[in-house]
Image (tube, helix red, strand yellow):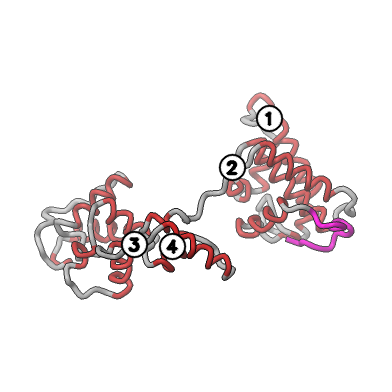
Amino acid sequence: MLMVLPSARGVRLLDYIERQTGWRASLADVRKRSPFESWPISVRHNLLVSALWLLDDWPERFVRAATAAGLSQSRILRGELLPFWFESEIRLNLGAGFPAPTGEEARQAAAYLVKDGKKISGCAVGRLIGSRNSAAARGYAKDKPVAMTDADFEHVIDKLSVEIKGLRPRSPKRLILQRDRTIYRLMRATGWSVKKLLGMTVGDAAGLASTPKGEREYSGEVAGLLLTYLRDTRRHLASECRSDALFIQWRGGVLCGKVWSCRSQKCKKPPKPGSHANGRSHRT
């Protein structure tokens, strides 16, 4: 990477970095072909920062930059002997002369992944059809979750309320379902993301709930939800937990995004017959 950047073709990559970040590497004469060690310290520093930025999220970010800059594999490799991890990705993603996979090939690859019990992604499909940079493979890139509508929130909240009804007070399952319902209610009332809610602390919640009515950024419903959760749910979930996280698991474990993802999938599924017969399951 440090060999590519201080060159006439590397300028295109530096231009891309500037467009994306607003930061520009200052090079005296990028056409001067000299070993990296011979450049002034300030230039070497700029080149290192640029290289690290391009290597982040490897190889996707570099491939996007090279594609936007119109650089082919021949312009980057230049017949040089380069490390396999670098050269192989360049040849795979930017190689000229390879047949372009069709949409049908990508669909067949995706069907194979499903049959094999694997997740579909642009990277997984691309590896099967031989080019992660193909439009066909990119069509299977992982999408961002679709935002829930009011009807979606109402459905999930009603479902949780039905499951909660009849469960033993303060049982683990009831407390967990109450926590989940509070998260969905707060998402609907505030528009906050799950990431923001899971990052909140007890102090954050207490501060929001105690804000004078005239100074509140959100409705009184939000304050009520937070106070009710702190009083009726969190303190019983916490046990001897010393964590200050607002939303926690049974006995105080931090509720991380991965755990919540599993929980949210369960929340959206129809309840199993007799699933609320006791409160001794789903302790997450």
For label 2, the crowd category at 10 Å Cα-Cα, with few meaning under 14, some 14 to 19 and many 20 or more, is few
User: 240 or 29, which lies in front?
Assistant: 29
Q: Looking at the picture, how far across and down is residue 32, in whole percent?
A: 9, 60
Q: Is residue 56 visible?
A: no
Q: Secondary structure at mark 4?
A: helix
Q: Quadrant of the N terminus?
A: bottom left
Check disc 3 and report the residue beneath it.
55
Q: Give me the disc on residue 105.
A: 4
Question: Of marks 1 and 2, which one's residue comes earlier in the chain?
Answer: 2
Determine contact: label 1, label 2, CB under 8 Å: no
Crowding around mark 3 (Cα neighbors within 10 Å: few <14, some 14 to 19, many 20+) is some
N-term-proximal mark, 4 vs 1:
4
Residue at 83% in and 49% down: 164
**Residue 131 percent coordinates (x, y):** 36, 64
How far, Cα to Cα, is label 4 from label 1? Answer: 52 Å
Q: Earlier in the sequence, mark 2 or mark 3?
A: 3
In the rendered image, which residue does mark 2 sit on? 147
Closest to the camera, between mark 4 and mark 1, is 4
- Choose mark 2 or mark 4, whichever is in front: 4
